[in-house]
Amino acid sequence: MLSPRSFFDLSEFLHAPLFLDQEYVWTALTRLKEYMDGYLYPRLKSPLLPDAEPLPRTVVLHDGQILSATGLNIVYGDTTKQQLRVSTDDRVLTGATVIMAGAVLMGSQIALGHGVLVESGALIKSPAIIGDYTEIRQGAYLRGYCLTGTHCVIGHTTEVKHSIFLDHAKAGHFAYLGDSILGRDANLGAGTKFANLRFLPGNVAIRTSEGLIDTGRRKFGAILGDKVQTGCNSVTNPGTLIGKEGILMPNTTAPSGFHPPRTILR
């Protein structure tokens, strides 16, 4: 019941090996650090990309090259719909990634996919794996061990740490995600917060119809299945699991435990 298969369609997810169907879904979070530490990151070393300092100028990554955006034509279309376009006067730089002036990258373990946009004021701490056609918006704060699939959004003043976004997952505005997983096409309303630490000592336990299950995790936010939606200013308690196509209504606090698919939490 609480296996990855019951929450996600992983058939197209590049990082599906994080999830083992004979284990509980949250064990992917336990495996995340080892997986990301062992990942082969590209070498992003250039005077154009100072470490831990705001970029003085916009930079473009294309075919393994780090290029100044000076003289390039950039159309800032919808990144998640592959409408970010970079070109010279005579050719299109297909799949180019854009890191805007004012963004900060900290550390060497950062992988940015094709067609990614990192906006001014975003801060990405190593390690981070950002999938193709993902948008990291102004003021986003990625605190390390952040992994996204393709076509994702980490939005304005959204803070993420030790979390996984499956393809097309979006946390667009004023969100906090710690030790959490968003399923494919999951969408967070503005101001959604995932609490990930109990007030009292001890591991987070999951309430189910068959009783409590100890997750073995002191920090554990929320797991949202495919196509789950949350309303504005909603909150989840530590250890909240919402099944596929569930809805957390605006201004609602979700209790800890497992909530079956298509549940509406009011």
Image (tube, grey):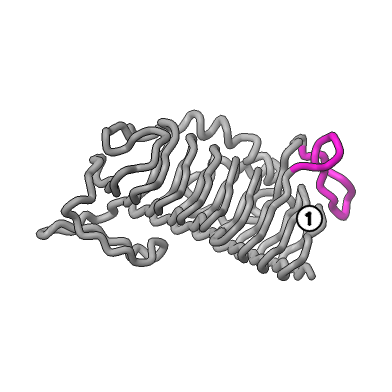
Q: Nearer the viewer, residue 201 or 70?
A: 70
- In the picture, measured across the screen, residue 119 lies left or right of residue 242, that is left
> Image height check: is 110 above or below 168?
above
Q: Which residue is mark 1?
A: 258
User: Percent x, y for residue 209?
Assistant: 87, 55
Q: Quadrant of the C terminus?
A: bottom right
> Image height check: is 190 above or below 136?
below
- In the picture, measured across the screen, residue 187 lies left or right of residue 47, that is right
Q: Residue at x 71, y 47 (%)?
A: 221
Q: Residue at x 81, y 53 (%)?
A: 256
Please give the range of residues in magenta.
197-215
User: Percent x, y for residue 158?
Assistant: 56, 53
Q: How many marks?
A: 1
> Image height check: is 189 above or below 56?
below
Q: Nearer the viewer, residue 234 or 187?
A: 234
Circle 1 SS class: strand
Q: Nearer the viewer, residue 64 or 7?
A: 64
Q: Residues within 10 Å of mark 1 (few under 14, many from 20)?
A: some
Residue 94 belongs to magenta span: no
Q: What's under tag 1, amino acid-wise?
A: Phe
User: Percent x, y for residue 134?
Assistant: 43, 55
Q: Residue at x 39, y 56 (%)?
A: 133
